[in-house]
Amino acid sequence: MPAGTPPDLLRRIETLASEYGLLVTVEVVASRLAVVVVDLDATGGVQRVADARRGDPDVVIAAYLTAPDRDRWESAERAGADLVANRGALVRSLRRLLGEPAAGHIRRRRVALFDANEVAGRLGLVMALPDSPVGPLAVFNAGDRLVGVEDRCPHSGARLSEGDVESGVVTCPGHGSRFELSSGQRVRGPADEGIRTYDVVVADGRVWLVWL
């Protein structure tokens, strides 16, 4: 929890934490954290999100604002926040993100990538994001669904987002390796392995990356 967290919000977070058997701390006192809460109204809030994500890719990051601010909201999402909410909705939204305490695990994380209206009328590459939470990412419209793949050929490191797409297969612009977008499997070398794929979904007017 950030220092200076409003008492009413702190009490509600402490109640939520007790349900999940988590310890609430004001500063980082342990090497392993489950959830980090960030006040985006505080100076350097977005940077704290980025620092927390770099420090532990598995931690759940929940950020909040006192009043809606689209620029800071989207900046926090791009920096790696799993959840951004108005202060009053933070605990309720965090509860939905974490899932049922009895489940024994935290649900998969998601982060907004871009507005869904940017997909309309576009086949093939929709967007390349060099700094997504999972690294370089290319999002393709395969006709019936969106797919996300790592934007790096395992053979030469060339950007697959700059390659040609045909019949659900992307060709590396470097040396011609080919990969199925739906599965990431190698179709043709010289690459000797496939590429990682990620779930990409459309919800609430946004395109989201979903990962474990």
Image (cartoon, helix red, strand yellow):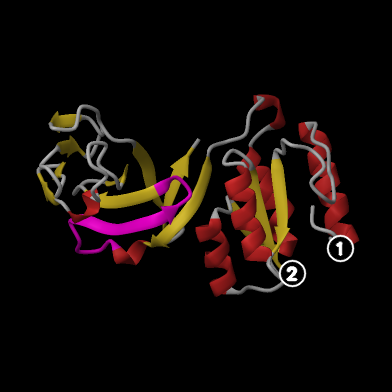
What is the distance, in whole Å, between disc 1 and disc 2 at their CAs? 10 Å
Picture quadrant of residue 30 = top right
Report whether 138 appears left or right of 105: left
Say above or below: 17 vs 207. Answer: above
Q: Give the residues in magenta.
A: 119-135
Amino acid type at circle 2 is: Ala
Total number of numbered labels?
A: 2
**Nearer the N terminus, badge 1 or badge 2?**
1
Closest to the observer, 166 or 49: 49
Amino acid type at circle 1 is: Gly
Horizontal and vertical percent for residue 211? 47, 39
Say above or below: 72 vs 17. Answer: below
Whether residue 85 is in magenta: the answer is no
Considering the numbered disc 1 on the image, is that residue within a helix, a strand or a loop? Answer: loop
Which residue was labeled with disc 2?
42
Report whether 183 appears left or right of 85: left
Q: Residue at x 25, y 51 (%)?
A: 159
Mark 1: few, some, or many residues within 10 Å (few <14, many ≥20)? few
Q: Residue at x 71, y 48 (%)?
A: 36
Say above or below: 169 vs 66. Answer: above
Q: Residue at x 84, y 60 (%)?
A: 5
Q: Which mark is residue 82?
A: none
Which residue was labeled with disc 1?
4
Report whether 11 appears left or right of 146: right
Closest to the observer, 87 or 169: 169
Horizontal and vertical percent for residue 129? 36, 57
Whether residue 123 is in magenta: the answer is yes
Is the Cβ of the residue at disc 1 closer than 8 Å to that at disc 2?
yes
Picture quadrant of residue 180 = top left
Mark 2: few, some, or many residues within 10 Å (few <14, many ≥20)? few
